[in-house]
Every structure is written in structure tokens, then in C-alpha cells.
Image (tube, rainbow, N blue to C red):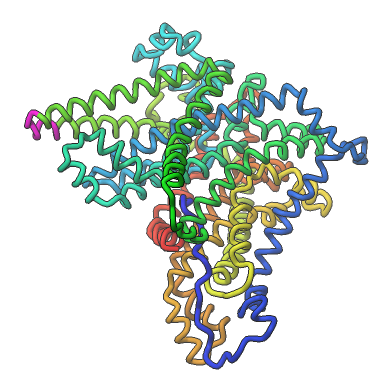
């Protein structure tokens, strides 16, 4: 899984090998190990430079052109000025902002709630955490299909269950929905909230895992001291838990905001931006202009005009992660401070404390202006959740104050169990629906007979899937691309990570920051110039186009992770090998790599699952059936309003099982690799 603190440590200062002698003038200027560093960093530099930095620069050039027939004509800033009056672009920017802001708010609330519930459990915490992690592990195409089917106004189980329970008509009377039964993805007023809900469902596990790690890092002494001072549970939460999680929350929200703001695959698979443009983000607008209309300049302008907003988030993240890694320059000690400077410093601290509240108020105001039909509904949902939590907390505190500790513990345990059960139902229900639908007959699916249980169980959907669709070919393509791109990323990341962790050369920190920036740069900035590049070298509709481009979004993280892991290996072991006559390369191969197996396995698991689940590049670069990967192939099975639910459920099960199995067996190595690489580093 992705760590929230993936910055590597500064390069370790390994001792010179025996008999190294004095440094030459070039070594003093460029660093003792500059030759070996250049060799180790060359593959990484070629891939990152050629497939990330150069395409972004080329995108800037493309944005100043316009396609006229077979030729591109220079038009200067015309594409940018045209966006000022482009209603589709305006709607895309607003949709991206609304989608991101609401999703992040609910992810924080639900993720923090889940982390607190799991943190206080003594039994079954590992099992429950594994179950809650499933939505984050399963491919996005599976997420989209399952929720699209559940939210179907006619055949979906959501409307049926809400109608039978009486909740649905109640929602209509409260004007939370316009009519009943609700068209969750087909009505303009409900489509965006529904897409946000699905994104929250998939993103909550990431927040839960991050917050769990943060809670474990808070010293228990602080809670004990607060309890002795008579603090209530709410006061302990407000004055101990939240301050202790402040940094984790900031990093997690910033990183998740970058991903969410540039989301394409989930929205495309759920609604394709509809109804109308109600859910179309700016990335989909760029795709429409560049790929569908073949106006590369206009599409590039759409992505680049949003670069300042993304750049601001990237800047914040880089500063936070560099501070984590201890690479921030130390502040100079101030002496002779006058009373005036002390008052100024206090005012500055107060201003910094007030800044998050001011930013939250500004975001809330913008949301109320941009989406009034969603704002009050979201406020109602959050208000109900907070009121219930506050009421339970007040009851528990009152019982404790009256000396009824047993009753207080009983109420607290019961409330936690109910909340955890509700969260598990929310998380597991779509996955359960996939599992049972895959084993239903076609008649049972159409007639909705025994909707929640196959009667009888059958393998008809699996047989039809392989008989009527080239599913086996899609599966083989995905395996080949995933394995090949993982091998490329693993070799390049191991070499570059070792250079950053062990070798001494000028520019190591600059290279590290550059790699960090390329990791958080979204695919939305790359798919247009990469598409043009692949057309130029005639690699579109080829598996090589995916093998070459997939490392662009896995290699940077893999490099940070391994750099941190290599830095955690005692340098004395390597020095001993050098004393025994090994060269630096031999010490790397015989000593460092064997000790770094957990980190290498963690990187392999991360890159393999990312390649297995990737949609945007495969969707843009591949059009022929024989070269499609599983996510794109499954999306092509839906034609218009015809949705083969049974076959898609069977395909989703077959796509998800390998990823879940890999995480189940590799969880220990993944945890160890990320802990050593991203935290110790």
C-alpha cells in the first residue's frame, strides 16, 4: 500500500573503502562517488526525463498550437484565452473542485472514525483492518462496476433495500432526493453525490491505515496525563489525538487531494461525465478535446492551466515530506530578541494557528456557492454523524462521572460495535454483491429471484465470459504488461535507490526532490504528450506502449521506498565487504540486495498491482481488442444501456482474486518494507 510518508532519507555517508587515497579535483567538485552514481542513476534519469519531464515540456509547446488538417499551426496563447469563455471547461474545473473537497472531508471523518474504532480494539484488529483494506485493493474497474450495478434505478439493490426498509420514501419527503425511486447516476442532482460516495468508499481504507499508524505513534503518557487532569474523552480527542495526528492528516489529505483532483477512471467508468456535464472533471474535458476531437493544443492547455493548483499541493507535500526526512535546513538560533520581536513571533504563531480555520471557512464558502444542492445535504449527513457521536460520548462521560464504570464501558463497547458493523456493511456490501452475482444464472439476474443469494449456484457466467469475449487474451495481456513493467521499475528503482542512500555525489537532494515531484504529478499532464510521442514512434495499439509508460507512475515511489530501506541497512556490513576486497558493485549485489528482500518484495507488489489496475493510459493508447488489458476490456463489455451484469461480475471476481491473494501473502513483506523504507528512512 502507499505510505503517507514516502520520502527517503538523505544519502548515508558510507565510509570510503580502504586505501581510497586523496580525492581528485573532480571528486571534490562532484562528489566522491559521482561516476558510480551516474551509472546507477542513468536508467532512472532516462525514464523519468524521457517519459515525464520531456513530455510535460512538450505539452507546453503543444498548447501553443492548433491542428489544421494534418498540420499544427502556432497560435500562441489562443488556446488559453479560449478557455475563458469555454463553459465545458468552467464546469469541469468546478466539478473537480467539488468532487475533491467533499470526498476529502468524508474520507477524513470516516477514516478517522474507523482508525479510532480499530485502535481501541484488542481482538481481531488485524482481521478487521484487512477487511477494511479490500476496497483500496480491488481494481477501480471492479469498484465502478459493482456500484454502478447497485445504484441502478431498476435492477439495483440499493433502491430495493431502501424501499423495503421505508428509508427511501423518507429521503424523498426530506427532499434529500427529488423523487423515489431515485436515479442515482442518471439524475443531475444525484450523480455527483453518488460519484463522491463511491470515491469515499474506495479511499477510506487509505486514510484508515494512515491514521492507525499515526495513533500508534502518539505516546500513551499524554493520554494518562490528560486523564489525571480530569479531561473528558472529547477533551482528550481535541487536545491530544488531533494535535498528534495533525502532520499525518495534512500529508494524507494533500496526497489524496492530488489523486482525487486528477481522477479520471472512476468517473468515466461510472457516468462518463454525465448526465450532461454534471460529473465531468477537467481531466475528462482535456481527454475529450485532445483524444476525441484531436485538438491536442486545446487539450494540453486544459491540463496546463490547472498546473498552478496542482503545483501548490505538490509544493506543500514536498515541504512536509522533506521535513519528515530531516532534509530541511536548520533554522538559525536567534539571540538578543527584544520584547517587540517576541510579540511579533506570538502574533505570527496565532496567525498560523488561525490559517487552517480560515482556509476551511473559505473552502466551505466556495462549496456552498459552487454546489448549493450538495452543500446542505452534506451538512445534514455530517451533522447527524457528529450529533450521534457527541450523544454517545456524553452518555459515556456521564456514566463515568457517576461512578458507573461498568455501564460506561458497556455503552462504549456497544456503540463501537454498532459503528464498526455499519462500517463493515458499507465496505463489504458491494464486494459481496459481486461474489454472489458471479454465480447466478442469467434468468435469476433478470428476474431478480433471490437477489442476495444464488439459487442455484452456477458457473454459467464464467463459461459465457470466456466463450463470447476475448477475456483470456485480456488476462494474458495484463499479466505480460504487469510483469514486464514491474521488472523494469524494480531494476531501475534498486539502482537509483542505492545511489541516493549510499553514494556521495553533488545534487543528491535535488535529484530526490525531482523524483518526488514526478511521483505526484498526475497522469492528466502526461497522457496527451505521451500519446503524441507513441504515435510518432508507432507504438500505439501495442503492449510495448504500456510497458514503456507504466513505470512513469510507479518508479518514483519505488525509488523512495528502496532508498529509505537501503539507508536502514547498517552501513558496517557493507564496509566489512569492502574491507574483504569486494568492489562497491559486488557489495551491492552480495550484501545489500539480499538484506533488502522485504523492500524489494514491497516494491514488486506495489508496482505489480498498480500496473494490473491501470486504466487511463491503457484506455487512451489501446483501441484494438487483441491488445486490451483487463480494465479496458471490461469497460468495452458495456455497450450503451446493455450491461452484462453476470459476466461483468464473473470478470470482476477473476480480476480481483490475484490482487487480494498477493496482498494477503505479501502483507508482512509490504508492511516491513514500507515501515523501514518510508518511516525509518
The residue at 49%/58% (across/down) is 331
In the rendering, at what x and y percent does residue 478 appear?
Answer: 61, 51
> Between residues 291 and 327, which one lies in front from this camera angle?
327
> Between residues 182 and 152, which one lies in front from this camera angle?
182
In the rendering, at what x and y percent does residue 13 appear?
Answer: 50, 75
Could you tell whether 13 is left or right of 514 in the image?
A: left
Q: Quadrant of residue 426?
A: top left
Above-or-below relation of 367 to 630: above
The residue at 55%/21% (across/down) is 191
> Between residues 511 and 420, which one lies in front from this camera angle?
511
In the rendering, at what x and y percent does residue 643 appear?
Answer: 58, 27
> Between residues 478 and 555, which one lies in front from this camera angle?
555
The residue at 51%/36% (across/down) is 143
Q: Quadrant of residue 77?
A: top right
Could you tell whether 400 is left or right of 377 in the image?
A: left
Above-or-below relation of 117 to 574: above
Count of residue discs:
0
Res. 464 visible in picture: no
Res. 403 visible in picture: yes
Residue 168 magenta: no
Q: Residue furthest left?
A: 403
The residue at 45%/9% (across/down) is 175
In the rendering, at what x and y percent does residue 107 appear?
Answer: 44, 35
Stretch of the chain drawn in magenta: 402-409
Amino acid at each position: 500500500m502507499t505510505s503517507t510518508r514516502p520520502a527517503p532519507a538523505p544519502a548515508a555517508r558510507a565510509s570510503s573503502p580502504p586505501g581510497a587515497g586523496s580525492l581528485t579535483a573532480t571528486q571534490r567538485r562532484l562528489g566522491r562517488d559521482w561516476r558510480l552514481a551516474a551509472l546507477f542513476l542513468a536508467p532512472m534519469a532516462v525514464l523519468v526525463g524521457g517519459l515525464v519531464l520531456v513530455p510535460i515540456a512538450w505539452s507546453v509547446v503543444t498548447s501553443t498550437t492548433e491542428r489544421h488538417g494534418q498540420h499544427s499551426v502556432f497560435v500562441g496563447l489562443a488556446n488559453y484565452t479560449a478557455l475563458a469563455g469555454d463553459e465545458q471547461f468552467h464546469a469541469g474545473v468546478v466539478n473537480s473542485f467539488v468532487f475533491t473537497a467533499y470526498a476529502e472531508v468524508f474520507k477524513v471523518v470516516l477514516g478517522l472514525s474507523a482508525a479510532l474504532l480499530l485502535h481501541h480494539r484488542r481482538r481481531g484488529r488485524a482481521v478487521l483492518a484487512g477487511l477494511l483494506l479490500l476496497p483500496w485493493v480491488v481494481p477501480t474497474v471492479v469498484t465502478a462496476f459493482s456500484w454502478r450495478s447497485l445504484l441502478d434505478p431498476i435492477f439495483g439493490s440499493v433502491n430495493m433495500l431502501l424501499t423495503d426498509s421505508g428509508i427511501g420514501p423518507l429521503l424523498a419527503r426530506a427532499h434529500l432526493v427529488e423523487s423515489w425511486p431515485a436515479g442515482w447516476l442518471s439524475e443531475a442532482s444525484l450523480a455527483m453525490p453518488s460519484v463522491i460516495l463511491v470515491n469515499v468508499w474506495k479511499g477510506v481504507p487509505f486514510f484508515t491505515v494512515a491514521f492507525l499508524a499515526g495513533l500508534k505513534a502518539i505516546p500513551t503518557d499524554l493520554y494518562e496525563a490528560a486523564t489525571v487532569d480530569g479531561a473528558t474523552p472529547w477533551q482528550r480527542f481535541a487536545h491530544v489525538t488531533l494535535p498528534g495526528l495533525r502532520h499525518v492528516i495534512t500529508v494524507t489529505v494533500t496526497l489524496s487531494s492530488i489523486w482525487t483532483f486528477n481522477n479520471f477512471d472512476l468517473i468515466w467508468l461510472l457516468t462518463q461525465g454525465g448526465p450532461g456535464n454534471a460529473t465531468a472533471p477537467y481531466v475528462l474535458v482535456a481527454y475529450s478535446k485532445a483524444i476525441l476531437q484531436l485538438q491536442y493544443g486545446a487539450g494540453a492547455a486544459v491540463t496546463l492551466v490547472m498546473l498552478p493548483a496542482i503545483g501548490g499541493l505538490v509544493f506543500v507535500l514536498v515541504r512536509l515530506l522533506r521535513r519528515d526526512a530531516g532534509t530541511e535546513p536548520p533554522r538559525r538560533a536567534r539571540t538578543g530578541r527584544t520584547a517587540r520581536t517576541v510579540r511579533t513571533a506570538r502574533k505570527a504563531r496565532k496567525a498560523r494557528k488561525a490559517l487552517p480555520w480560515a482556509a476551511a471557512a473559505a473552502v466551505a464558502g466556495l462549496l456552498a456557492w459552487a454546489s448549493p444542492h450538495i452543500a446542505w445535504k452534506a451538512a445534514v449527513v455530517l451533522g447527524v454523524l457528529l450529533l450521534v457521536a457527541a450523544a454517545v460520548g456524553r452518555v459515556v462521560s456521564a456514566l463515568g462521572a457517576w461512578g458507573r464504570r461498568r455501564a460506561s464501558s458497556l455503552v462504549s463497547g456497544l456503540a463501537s460495535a454498532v459503528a464498526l458493523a455499519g462500517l463493515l456493511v458499507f465496505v463489504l456490501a458491494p464486494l459481496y454483491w459481486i461474489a454472489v452475482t458471479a454465480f447466478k444464472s442469467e434468468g435469476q439476474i433478470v428476474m431478480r429471484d433471490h437477489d442476495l443469494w444464488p439459487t442455484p449456484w452456477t458457473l454459467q457466467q464464467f463459461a459465457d465470459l470466456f466463450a463470447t469475449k476475448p477475456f483470456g487474451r485480456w488476462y494474458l495481456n495484463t499479466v505480460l504488461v504487469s510483469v514486464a513493467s514491474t521488472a523494469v521499475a524494480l531494476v531501475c528503482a534498486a539502482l537509483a535507490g542505492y545511489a541516493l542512500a549510499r553514494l556521495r555525489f553533488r545534487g543528491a537532494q535535488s535529484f530526490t526532490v525531482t523524483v518526488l515531484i514526478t511521483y505526484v504529478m498526475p497522469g492528466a499532464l502526461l497522457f496527451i504528450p505521451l500519446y503524441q510521442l507513441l504515435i510518432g514512434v508507432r507504438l500505439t495499439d501495442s503492449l510495448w506502449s504500456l510497458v514503456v509508460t507504466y513505470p512513469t507512475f510507479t518508479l518514483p515511489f519505488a525509488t523512495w521506498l528502496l532508498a529509505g530501506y537501503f539507508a536502514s541497512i547498517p552501513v558496517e556490513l557493507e564496509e566489512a565487504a569492502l574491507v574483504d576486497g569486494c568492489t562497491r558493485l559486488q557489495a551491492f549485489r552480495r550484501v545489500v540486495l539480499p538484506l533488502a528482500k522485504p523492500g524489494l518484495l514491497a516494491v514488486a507488489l506495489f508496482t505489480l498491482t498498480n500496473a494490473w489496475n491501470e486504466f487511463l493510459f491503457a484506455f487512451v493508447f489501446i483501441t484494438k481488442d487483441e491488445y486490451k488489458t483487463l480494465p479496458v476490456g471490461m469497460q468495452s463489455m458495456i455497450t450503451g444501456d446493455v450491461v452484462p451484469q453476470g459476466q461483468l461480475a464473473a470478470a470482476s471476481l477473476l480480476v480481483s482474486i490475484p490482487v487480494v491473494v498477493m496482498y494477503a501473502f505479501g502483507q508482512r513483506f509490504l508492511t516491513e518494507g514500507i515501515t523501514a523504507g518510508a518511516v525509518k528512512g
